[in-house]
Image (cartoon, grey):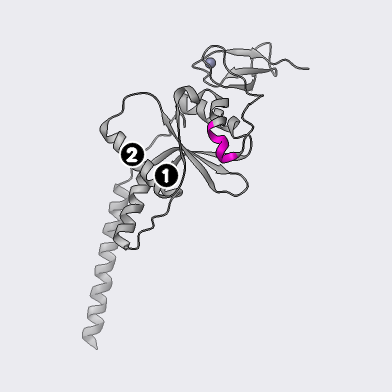
């Protein structure tokens, strides 16, 4: 009986020592971070606005989505399943279009910026396509010109969302072709007045008066 009590005491002391070591190590491994200045690059930002216009309030536009949020591995072998999950977790989709009513994924969008990509990146994109195909999720590829053309995006999305394909309200920048957004002046003589401003501002300074009726 006495031996058991001693053994128990030794185990408790051992546990406390290990725990204090682990805790100390955790504190020592804290890293410092700064917030990214912007969530989107200029192209991503312009495209996000164009997509929001194109889906006409019928869908939600999700950006930078982990592939694992929209697919579930269908492997019966546990080891294979966890590897399949890890593979999907690592991949990020540029945009996912989600039906507003049902909450179901309508399609995914990958951006082709026209630049030559490395073999590694090409392999990763191929893997993303293969995973989406296996899950029966449509992948729509948009190039940078599409990024600025709401009507072209609407046409591409219309088979999945039943959209009015000739978009009436969208306005475009006369300088760079990006969608225009409405902004209210916060300083100067025109404070409070609303303007059409290029969605790439401050990188593009195009401004247009709003014709009030
Ligand atoms: Zn512009």
| Residue 192 percent location from the top left of the image | 70, 19
Q: Residues within 10 Å of mark 1 (few under 14, many from 20)?
A: some
* Residue 15 appears in the picture as rendered: yes
Query: Vertically, is 192 above or below 2?
Result: above
| Residue 30 percent location from the top left of the image | 33, 45
Is residue 165 left or right of 35 when viewed as pictured?
Answer: right
Q: Which residues are magenta?
A: 156-161
Disc 1, ligand 1: is the CB inside 8 Å? no
Q: Which numbered dot is residue 126?
A: 2
Q: Residues within 10 Å of mark 2 (few under 14, many from 20)?
A: few
Q: Of 18 and 77, which appears nearest the observer?
A: 77
Circle 2: element type = helix
Q: Is residue 158 magenta?
A: yes
Residue drawn at point x = 22 percent, y = 79 percent = 7
Is residue 112 left or right of 105 when viewed as pictured?
Answer: left
The quadrant of the rendering that contains the C terminus is: top right
Residue drawn at point x = 33 percent, y = 39 percent = 126
Query: Vertically, is 138 above or below 181?
Result: below
* Residue 91 appears in the picture as rendered: no
Name the quadrant containing residue 100: top right
| Residue 53 percent location from the top left of the image | 60, 30
The quadrant of the rendering that contains the N terminus is: bottom left
Circle 1: element type = strand
Q: Which numbered dot is residue 66?
A: 1
Q: Is residue 21 magenta?
A: no
């Amino acid at each position: 009986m006495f031996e058991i009590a001693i053994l128990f005491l030794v185990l408790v002391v051992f546990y406390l020592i290990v725990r204090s070591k682990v805790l100390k190590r955790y504190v020592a491994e804290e890293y410092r971070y700064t917030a990214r200045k912007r969530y989107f690059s200029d192209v991503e930002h312009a495209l996000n606005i164009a997509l929001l216009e194109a889906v006409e309030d019928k869908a939600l536009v999700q950006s930078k989505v982990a592939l694992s949020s929209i697919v579930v591995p269908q492997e019966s072998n546990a080891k294979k399943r966890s590897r399949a999950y890890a593979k999907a977790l690592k991949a990020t989709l540029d945009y996912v279009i989600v039906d507003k009513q049902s909450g179901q994924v309508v399609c995914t969008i990958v951006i082709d910026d026209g630049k030559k990509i490395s073999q590694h990146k090409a392999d990763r994109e191929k893997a993303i396509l293969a995973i989406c195909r296996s899950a029966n999720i449509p992948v729509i590829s948009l190039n940078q010109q599409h990024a600025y053309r709401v009507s072209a995006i609407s046409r591409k999305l219309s088979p999945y969302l039943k959209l009015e394909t000739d978009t009436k309200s969208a306005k475009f920048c006369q300088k760079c072709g990006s969608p225009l957004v409405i902004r209210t002046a916060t300083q100067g003589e025109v404070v409070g007045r609303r303007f059409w401003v290029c969605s790439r501002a401050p990188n593009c300074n195009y401004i247009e008066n709003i014709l009030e009726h």
